[in-house]
Image: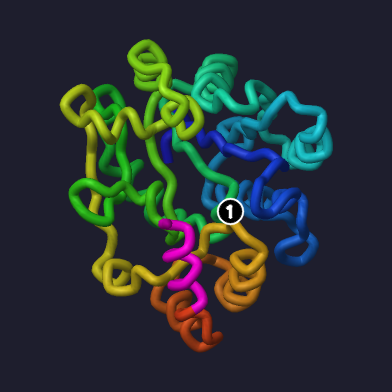
Amino acid sequence: MTDTVFFILQVRTSSTRLPGKMLMPFHEDKTIPEIIIERLMNNGISSKNIIVATTNNPKDDGLASLLAKKKCNIFRGEEYNVLKRFIDAASLFNAKYFFRVCADNPFLNFGYIAEIIDKVEYQKTDYSSFYLDNTTPTIKTHFGFFCEYTSLKTLKRVASLTKSAKDIEHVTPFIYEHSDLFNIQKLQIPEMLKRNQWLRLTIDTYDDFVMAQTIFEKNQDCENIANIIQTAENSGYKGKMQKIIEQQSK
């Protein structure tokens, strides 16, 4: 495991559909961001290579205090200009290469992260991600297993090329939507996931939260995708997940 790669966890308490979800106990009184941080550390990532990038809104004071107990780096910056928040956080801690991790995903799968770490060419690659197909990076899916690799240099270039509200809020779209401008590495997700695109484990609504909790109880290592899919099916969640996906896509 290289010690030059950082993990920047994007997290805040404000949420339109489920306010305060980042402070809600998810499993054994631990919040989702706590679980994600612990998973990274349990897989050999040093706390000094983990950056919590939250906002300077006083509403996030409690969140920052809670996650500081994990001994990782805490950065507080722009609430709505998330691109700038990432650039400022990476600059402060000299994180030249990093994974952008969304705190909505308690099932973050370290096996997929390790695969990117093994294959990425740090000096040459601007963006690396698993893809559903040739044009859809997993950040645009609802699986909840994946994060995306990029670099400080790349994000600074994005900031110099676009002022779009979408790019500022979502950080990476300008990269994967302009493959002619960036060196992009695409890794294909397993066929098992392509066959089960109804699976939704990212947390956006209260229903998402409850279903994910039930599935997590039996799949805490988050590595066996087949078991996770089977648990979701056995719990009767397939139709409900499909319905939420359809509603979110409208």
Residue occupying image coordinates x 59% and y 15%: 92
Residue that lies at the very extreme toward the front in this rendered image: 250
Query: Magenta includes 5?
Result: no
Q: Residue 67: x, y in percent?
A: 74, 40
Give the camera-side residue of 4 and 99. Answer: 99
Give the camera-side residue of 29 and 159. Answer: 159
Against 150, residue 37 (above or below) is below
Against 232, residue 156 (above or below) is above
Give the camera-side residue of 17 and 77. Answer: 17
Residue occupying image coordinates x 35% and y 21%: 154
In the picture, residue 119 is in which quadrant? top left
Split into 4 quadrants, where in the image is the C terminus? bottom left
Residue that lies at the very extreme toward the top in this rendered image: 160
Q: Residue 111: x, y in percent?
A: 40, 56
Q: Residue 184: x, y in percent?
A: 23, 34
Residue occupying image coordinates x 28% and y 59%: 189
Q: Residue 182: x, y in percent?
A: 23, 25
Residue occupying image coordinates x 73% and y 49%: 19
Against 67, residue 248 (above or below) is below
**Horizontally, is 135 left or right of 15 in the view?**
left
Against 156, residue 102 (above or below) is below
In the picture, residue 125 is in which quadrant? top left
How did the renderer colour the structure? rainbow
Split into 4 quadrants, where in the image is the N terminus? top left
Give the camera-side residue of 160 and 151. Answer: 160
Q: Secondary structure at mark 1?
A: helix
The prevailing secondary structure element of the residues shown in magenta is helix
Q: Amino acid at mark 1?
A: Arg
Residue beneath disc 1: 39
Write the start and end of the magenta stretch as one range: 240-250
In the picture, residue 5 is in which quadrant? top left
**Horizontally, is 230 left or right of 184 in the view?**
right
